[in-house]
Image: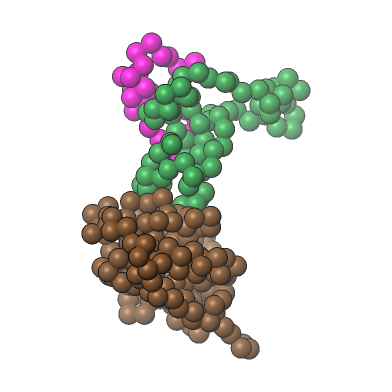
Chain colours: A brown, B green
């Protein structure tokens, strides 16, 4: 492969929360029947996790498996290993109905960190973000203002947001604007 | 603002996250059918004032199509259910009749 660079090359901004573009990340869309034994064992073998429950994100070191819909998972792996992971998945699931695609370069990832990061997302997405309704370890696919996005809370002060690479510039501006100093709502405490 | 619960991902989604797909439980007439049947399928819809069954897609979420039963006048939602069915499930019918005793399935 040639020279690879993420959409905004690690841009950051500082408001009442810090917004950073996370650089390249390997992402694989994996679809299939979650109840299938071969499907389950393949995810276990390659990602080291079980199949996540509804809206759950499971981690194993630097890899993550996220529930996207009743028949779709998003696998997050180091960018350099994405192609090999797809090969391994395809080989293991050869005789099982499935779909595995490397979508790494169609995506951008942002991290928003700080005590008040829930406010940053809360302003742009139609989602109840109270820690009781949306705990750490869950993922939500929704929209951020005008574009599709998915996000999950890594811990009490960090959220990661995934969107299409083509709208990375819009997303960065949106989140930066939402995190403008002095504009924290303080709704989610 | 309409708020519907997606039966596939369990998310309580509001209107802007969803796409309306029109009337539910239509019988599809395709090649080989009579012109009248095709016209009915293609163009003619009930314009219900009251209890209505609709198709919705959780387009910004899990991407799945589901069905919703709601009142077009009050916007009251009686329930949502999966699309893998030819008619509204019993629990939805029960929920509607509990609120609208005079209503009956057409």
Question: Is residue B47 found left or right of B37 in the rendered image?
Answer: left
Q: Is residue B23 left or right of residue A37?
A: right
Q: Quadrant of residue A44?
A: bottom left
B85 in relation to A9, above or below: above
Camera-side residue of B24 and A174: A174
Task: Judge by depth and name the residue closer to the eye, A45 or B94.
Answer: B94
Q: In the rendered image, is residue A22 in sight?
A: no
Q: Which residue lies furthest to the top in this view?
A: B102
Q: Which residue is drawn at 32% across and 57% down?
A: A185
- The residue lying at 41 percent from left, 50 percent from top is A126
Identify the image quadrant of the N terminus of chain A: bottom right
- Relative to B13, say whether A55 is above or below: below
Q: Which residue occupies the extreme bottom position in the image?
A: A2
Given residues B85 and B69, the one toward you in this image is B69
Residue name at image x 38 percent, y 41 percent: B5
x and y, in percent, of residue A71 in the image: 45, 55
Query: Picture coordinates of residue A22 (x, y %)?
Result: 45, 78
A89 magenta-colored:
no
Q: Residue A28's spot in the image, x, y percent?
A: 50, 70
Range drawn in magenta: B79-106
At x 53% / y 19%, what residue is drawn? Answer: B48
Name the side, left or right, on which B81 lies relative to A189: right
Task: Please determine whether, in this image, residue A128 is positioned above or below residue B100.
Answer: below
């Amino acid at each position: 492969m040639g020279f690879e660079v993420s959409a905004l090359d690690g841009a950051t901004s500082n408001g009442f929360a810090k917004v950073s573009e996370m650089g390249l990340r390997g992402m694989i869309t994996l679809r299939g029947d979650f109840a299938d034994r071969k499907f389950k064992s393949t995810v276990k073998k390659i990602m080291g996790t079980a199949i996540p429950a509804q809206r759950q994100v499971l981690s194993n070191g630097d890899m993550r498996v996220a529930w996207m819909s009743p028949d779709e998972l998003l696998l997050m792996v180091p960018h350099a290993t994405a192609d090999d992971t797809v090969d391994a998945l395809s080989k293991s699931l050869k005789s099982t109905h499935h779909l595995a695609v490397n979508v790494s370069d169609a995506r951008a990832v942002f991290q928003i960190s700080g005590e008040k990061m829930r406010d940053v997302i809360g302003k742009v997405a139609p989602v109840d973000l109270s820690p009781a309704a949306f705990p750490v370890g869950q993922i939500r696919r929704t929209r951020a203002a005008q574009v599709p996005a998915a996000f999950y809370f890594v811990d009490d002060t960090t959220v990661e947001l995934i969107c299409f690479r083509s709208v990375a510039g819009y997303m960065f501006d949106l989140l930066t604007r939402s995190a403008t100093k002095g504009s924290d709502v303080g709704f989610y405490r | 603002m309409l708020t519907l619960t997606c039966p596939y991902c369990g998310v309580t989604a509001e209107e802007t996250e969803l796409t309306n797909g029109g009337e539910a439980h239509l019988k599809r007439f395709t090649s080989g059918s009579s012109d009248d049947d095709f016209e009915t399928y293609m163009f003619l819809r009930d314009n219900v004032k009251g209890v209505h069954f609709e198709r919705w897609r959780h387009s910004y979420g899990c991407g799945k199509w589901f069905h919703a039963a709601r009142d077009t006048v009050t916007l009251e939602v009686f329930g949502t259910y999966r699309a893998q069915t030819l008619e509204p499930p019993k629990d939805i019918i029960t929920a509607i009749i509990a609120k609208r005793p005079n209503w009956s399935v057409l």
